[in-house]
Amino acid sequence: MKEFLTVGQIINTHGIKGEVKVYPLTDNTNRFRKIKKVYIDDEERNVLWCKIQPDKIIMKIEGIETPEVAFKYKNKYLKVSRKDAVALEKGSYFVADIIGCTVIDEEEKIIGTVHDVIFTGSNDVYWVKGNEDDVMIPALKSIVVNMDMSNKRIVIKPVRTWS
């Protein structure tokens, strides 16, 4: 499992004191209120404060004191240490842990590897790249039988093709 988890991306500067606008890459933006440290390019930085807005987060990060310095961080990703990440509910997983998992069906047929997770609003969809075709797998309890993150395996009900 990855040691660091990406929680946001700096999308622009904000104000005259080096604040940054962050696009959150988490499903619960209130998690930003508890973040004390972030890593930018593997360098640890203290978070001095943050303000949550409907579609972005405004943050003041130690060492970024001017708009000019803040601009240099545009498009950089903010990461947190896994040990500082929020605890997930049972049956919930970090996207970073799902990507790269091998997907097999109950008959032991290898479907492929999770390439990405697509958020549709009603349910997530796993974009699985197979040897021949890409497959979109809805992340529903009726389809996903087992999530084994320690072995990087996801077991699903057999995929049926329509003719």
Image: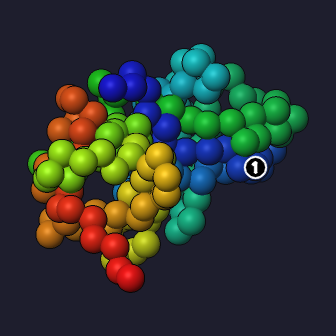
Judging depth in this view, the residue of 151 and 71 nearest the camera is 151
Near mark 1 (Cα within 10 A), the count class, few <14, some 14-19 or many ≥20, is some
The residue lying at 61 percent from left, 32 percent from top is 61
Q: Residue furthest front?
A: 163
- Looking at the picture, does residue 42 appear above or below residue 32? above
- Rendered image quadrant of residue 140: bottom left
Give me the residue at 43% from left, 34% from top.
Answer: 5
**Can residue 89 be seen from the camera position used here?**
no
Direction from residue 137 to residue 92 in the image, left or right: left
The scheme the figure's colours follow is: rainbow
- Residue 100 in percent (x, y) is at 40, 37
Q: Residue furthest right?
A: 68
Across and down, in percent, residue 25 comes to 50, 51
Residue nearest the observer in this picture, 144 or 26: 144
Query: Mark 1: which amino acid?
Result: Asn
Report which quarter residue 80 is drawn in: top left
* Residue corresponding to mark 1: 12
User: Quick check: 124 left or right of 69?
Assistant: left
SS type, badge 1: strand
Front-most of 14 and 95? 95
Q: Residue at x 75, y 34 (%)?
A: 73
Can residue 136 be seen here? The reply is yes
Residue 81 lies, in percent from the top left, at 40, 25
**Left or right, 9 with reference to 151:** right
| Figure check: 11 above or below 70 | below
Q: Locate residue 37, reporting x and y percent.
A: 47, 27
Residue at horizontal 40 percent and vertical 74 percent from the top: 121
